[in-house]
Image (cartoon, helix red, strand yellow):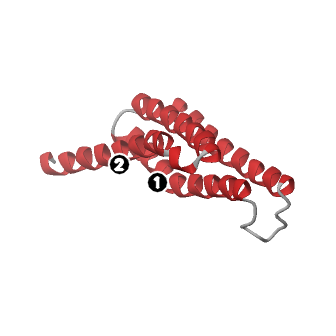
Amino acid sequence: MDFVIVVVVLALIQFIAFGILVGHARSKYNVAAPASSGDPIFERYNRVHLNTLEQLVCFLPAIFIYSHVGNANIAAGLGVVYLIGRLVYLRSYIADPASRGIGFALTGLPTLFMLLASLIIVIGNLVTG
């Protein structure tokens, strides 16, 4: 479980770092608060940050649930894939939003696996009671 906690803390730090990047982009591209649009590059940084928040809503419960009912080491490994996926998503989305697919897959698939595996495990436990 300790590895899972390390991954979760890194995911939250990554989210904060993406927010800092939005702040830097806001300054660099002269997008004064509270505006959330302006320069297209700023908007890309902002969108990556918001999408990461959207992903965290599913990722965090998924990793904790699967580490509890499934396998904590596998959950941690999938969490590392998620973290790498978020970095790939950031780099590709900033360069060209159309190229974000690999980063999105590396983020979404581990989360989806953990959610579905958890559901299957728990339903199996209920059936075999």
The numbered mark at residue 67 is: none
> Which quadrant of the structure image shows residue 87?
top right
Say which residue label 2 marks. 115
| Amino acid type of the residue tagged 2 in the rendering | Leu
Disc 1 is placed on an element classified as: helix
Depth check, front residue: 56 or 52? 52
Q: Residues within 10 Å of mark 2 (few under 14, many from 20)?
A: many
**Residue 91 in the image: x percent, y percent?**
62, 39
- At a point 64% along the width and 54% down the height, the residue shown is 49
Say which residue label 1 marks. 58
- At a point 43% along the width and 35% down the height, the residue shown is 75
In the displayed image of the protein, which residue is found farthest to the left?
A: 128
- At a point 77% along the width and 49% down the height, the residue shown is 20
Depth check, front residue: 114 or 37? 37
Q: Are marks 1 and 2 in contact (CB under 8 Å)?
A: yes
Disc 2 is placed on an element classified as: helix
Q: Earlier in the sequence, mark 1 or mark 2?
A: 1
**Residue 119 in the image: x percent, y percent?**
28, 50
- At a point 79% along the width and 52% down the height, the residue shown is 25
Depth check, front residue: 123 or 18? 18
| Amino acid type of the residue tagged 1 in the rendering | Cys
